[in-house]
Image: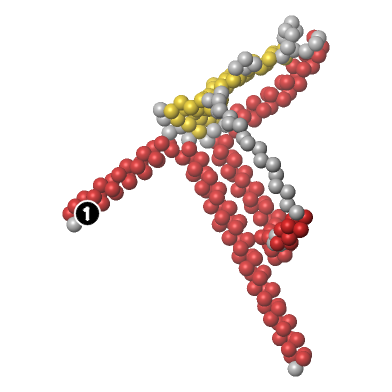
Amino acid sequence: MIVLKIIGWVLLGLLGLLLALILFALCVKVRFRIEYSSENTSVLLKWLFLKIPIYPGKPKEKKPKEEKPPEEKPQEEEKEEKEKKPKQGGGFLQTLYDAEGVDGLLAILQKVLSYTKRFFGGAYRGFVVDELYLDVRCTKEDAAATAIYYGEVCAVLFPLLGNLASKCKLKKYDFNIYPDFIARFSDASFVTSFHITPMYYIGITTAYVCRLLFGVLIGMLVKISGANKEKKSSRNENKNTKEKSEG
């Protein structure tokens, strides 16, 4: 018995150590670094002691596939298979629509959208941009076209960058967008590195799933079950009235 207790305590200690290591690993930041230019593009992932090049990755050797000619089925077998396929009913949403109508569906859709908005708001807050350096050179055929093109690029990029800076944590950044009246072609390059914490996203995802489960799905099931009970009671009443009228 003493040996079994010792083995049990050792296994319990190892399990606790494993869970502690998993929690520690999920709390470690996952870092990404992206470098883009007209000459080269690279995406690197860093987590713990791992450095994984996502792009360009290792080229995979493609094995030639042997193509088999498609087997032709006679028309009679195709007709039999089509007849055997079960007909699809209205489904879960159709049952809910029959129970609550359009108003019920709209109320549930509003709940789902509000929960989704909260989820993405939390996802933005957990996304931290450590550095973002953008360099864009605007060039067209002549000076007038270059100036117009430069204005169009600024009108698109600066609102996007402002939206990013307002929703995410942006630590270091530098945006260099300029017109070049001498160059022959436009060019763009950027370098960015950002990080996320897996535990944070696991937490907000779990909260989102629980809200959908308890706030939407269970409510839908309760409404459908109530509607089914009302239908059964109405059917029983109709049967009783018919039996009385026949008697």
Q: Is residue 143 above or below residue 52?
A: above
Give the side of residue 177 with respect to residue 169, left or right: right
Residue found 21% across the figure and 50% down from its top: 6
Where residue 74 sits, quadrant-wise, is: bottom right
| Image quadrant containing the C terminus | bottom right
Quarter of the figure that contains the N terminus: bottom left
In the displayed structure, does residue 163 sit left or right of residue 145? left
Q: Residue 245 in the image: state x and y as whole percent.
A: 77, 90
Residues packed near mark 1 inside 10 Å, few (<14), some (14 to 19) or many (20 plus): few
Residue 166 in sight in this render = no
* Vertical order, 142 against 125 (above or below): above
Residue 16 placement: quadrant: top left
Q: Give the residue at the far top of this rendering.
A: 182
Circle 1: element type: helix
- Residue 71, placed above or below residue 171: below
Q: Residue pushed farthest bottom?
A: 247
- What residue do we see at 56% from left, 38% from top? 123
Q: Is residue 7 above or below residue 60?
A: below
**Residue under label 1:** 4
Left-right relation of 124 to 188: left
Percent position of residue 98, x then y: 72, 65
Task: Indicate the position of residue 140 as horizontal and vertical percent values.
Answer: 78, 13
Identify the amino acid type marked 1: Leu
Give coordinates of residue 219: x percent, y percent: 60, 61
Which residue is depicted at the point 49% across and 44% down?
203
- Specify whether 124 is left or right of 73: left
Residue 82 versus residue 161: which sits nearer the camera? 82
| Point 36% across, 39% down: residue | 21
